[in-house]
Each structure stands twice: as C-alpha cells, then as structure tokens.
Image (tube, rainbow, N blue to C red):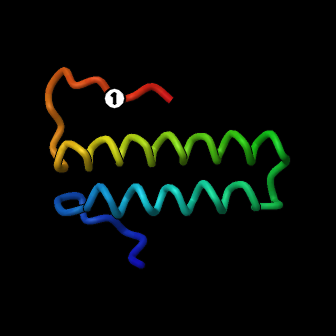
Amino acid sequence: MRNQLDIFDHDPARMAAANRAAADHALHDRQFIESDRQERAAYYTREAERWEFSAALGGRQINGAQEPLA
C-alpha cells in the first residue's frame, strides 16, 4: 500500500479502511501506555467514521452537511 496520498485522487473508502487498520494497530502498539493507546485508537476510529461519511456522500462534501458525532 502506498503511504503517500495523492491529494487530488484519494478514495474515501480506502482511507476509511486504512484508518480502521491504524486504529487496530494503535490498540496493540506497546510503545505507548494504555491510555495513550486508547486515545490514538479513538482518534483513528473517528477519522475512519469521517471518511466513511464522505464515502456515503459519494466522495463529495456538501456545504452545511453535519458529520455524525463520535
């Protein structure tokens, strides 16, 4: 998988999946204490939900659209 994003052509579904994988990895990353692991996993989960919301909109953002609260 490429790590560098193409800022003009990134797929929201692919980004959501990458953030879900990062959240799973953050839960098992032993270089951080438990509270930090939980915070990092929560952050990546919120990002995944944001990308999933964007994917549900067909990859477009609508002005004034409310994203779901985590």
Q: Position of residue 49 (x, y in %)?
A: 43, 43
Q: Helix, strand, or loop for circle 1?
A: loop
Residue at the image position 49 percent from the left and 56 percent from the top = 19
Under mark 1, the amino acid is Glu
Tell me the quarter of the picture where residue 24 sits: bottom right
| Horizontal relation, residue 51 to residue 39: left or right | left
* Residue that sits furthest to the front in the current view: 56
- Position above or below: 15 against 37: below
Residue at the image position 37 percent from the left and 69 percent from the top = 4
Tell me the quarter of the picture where residue 25 sits: bottom right
| Horizontal relation, residue 50 to residue 43: left or right | left
Residue at the image position 45 percent from the left and 25 percent from the top = 69
| Horizontal relation, residue 26 to residue 58: left or right | right
Residue at image mark 1: 67
Q: Where is residue 13 in the image (x, y as percent from the top left)?
A: 32, 59
Residue at the image position 45 percent from the left and 48 percent from the top = 48
Q: Where is residue 41 in the image (x, y as percent from the top left)?
A: 64, 47
- Position above or below: 53 against 59: above
